Image: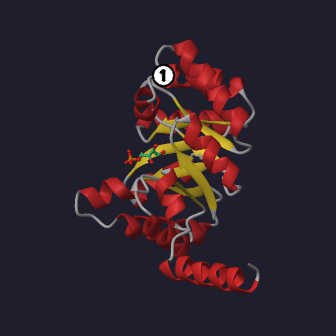
Amino acid sequence: MKFFIDTANLKEIGEAEQLGVLDGVTTNPSLMAKEGITGKDNILKHYVDICNIVAGDVSAEVNAVDFEGMVREGEELAELHEQIVVKLPMTRDGVRACKYFTDKGIRTNVTLVFSPGQALLAAKAGATYVSPFIGRLDDISTDGLNLIQEIREIYDNYGYETQILAASVRHTMHIVNCAKIGADVMTGPLSAILGLLKHPLTDSGLAQFLADYAKGNS
Ligand code: E4P
């Protein structure tokens, strides 16, 4: 499973990259705003800065909601850097724009996906990635992981190559469960990735090893 980090914070991206397990980055307009990145030129520069830190795919989201606007913005984003993947919303115009970019060989990530039918449409339009938001479904008492399972089944039935990018991952067990189901990618906060490291028996075992080594080598 590929690990993406879901942030526009350059420090966190650098920290995850340093760990050696990072395969890419996802951003969205809210994450950019959270970092205080505003204005077209600053936003475009920030995407390039992210591409220069991480070796993998970097999703950059369009802000237009009409087909022509999405095409215009998406083409500009794609030209920024070869690592850029154009992120499009799951709307009628977004699906149309996805097909447009697929035909042009530009990679896409269809976002804000909350149902298996939406994921099927994204695959039909040739999306590189589909982003089902599991945390936001959990927030409204709906099983987000079940959606990943349903999409996996549909894609496997027909051999769709669209990669399932489990998004809105909130914690470490989301990552583990997505891996069990067979999500191709997960995107989440650095804290969820670092949570995978933790086990109390690792900590106590290491403390014991260090203590025993110190006894014999002091
Ligand atoms: C996906 O690409 C989105 O950026 C993200 O995962 C949304 O997560 P949230 O629900 O925690 O805002």
- Say left or right for 28 vs 5: left
Residue at image coords 49%, 25%: 67
Please name the residue that numbered disc 1 is placed on. 37
Residue at image coords 49%, 64%: 195
- Say left or right for 63 vs 203: left
Q: Position of residue 151 (x, y in %)?
A: 48, 64
Residue at image coords 53%, 14%: 40
Q: How many marks?
A: 1
Q: Nearer the viewer, residue 62 or 119?
A: 62
User: Is the residue 189 above or below the residue 9 in the image?
Assistant: below
Q: Residues within 10 Å of mark 1 (few under 14, many from 20)?
A: some
Q: Is residue 126 visible?
A: no
Q: Nearer the viewer, residue 153 or 58?
A: 58
User: Is the residue 83 above or below the residue 150 in the image?
Assistant: above
Q: Position of residue 143 (x, y in %)?
A: 32, 67
Q: Position of residue 27 (x, y in %)?
A: 51, 38
Q: Nearer the viewer, residue 132 or 198?
A: 198
Locate the N terminus by quadrant. Answer: bottom right
Q: Amino acid at mark 1?
A: Ile
User: Is the residue 28 above or below the residue 123 in the image?
Assistant: above
Q: Nearer the viewer, residue 152 or 125?
A: 152
SS state under label 1: loop
User: Is the residue 106 above or below the residue 152 in the image?
Assistant: above
Q: Position of residue 216 (x, y in %)?
A: 74, 86
Residue sticking out furthest to the left: 141
Locate the C terminus by quadrant. Answer: bottom right
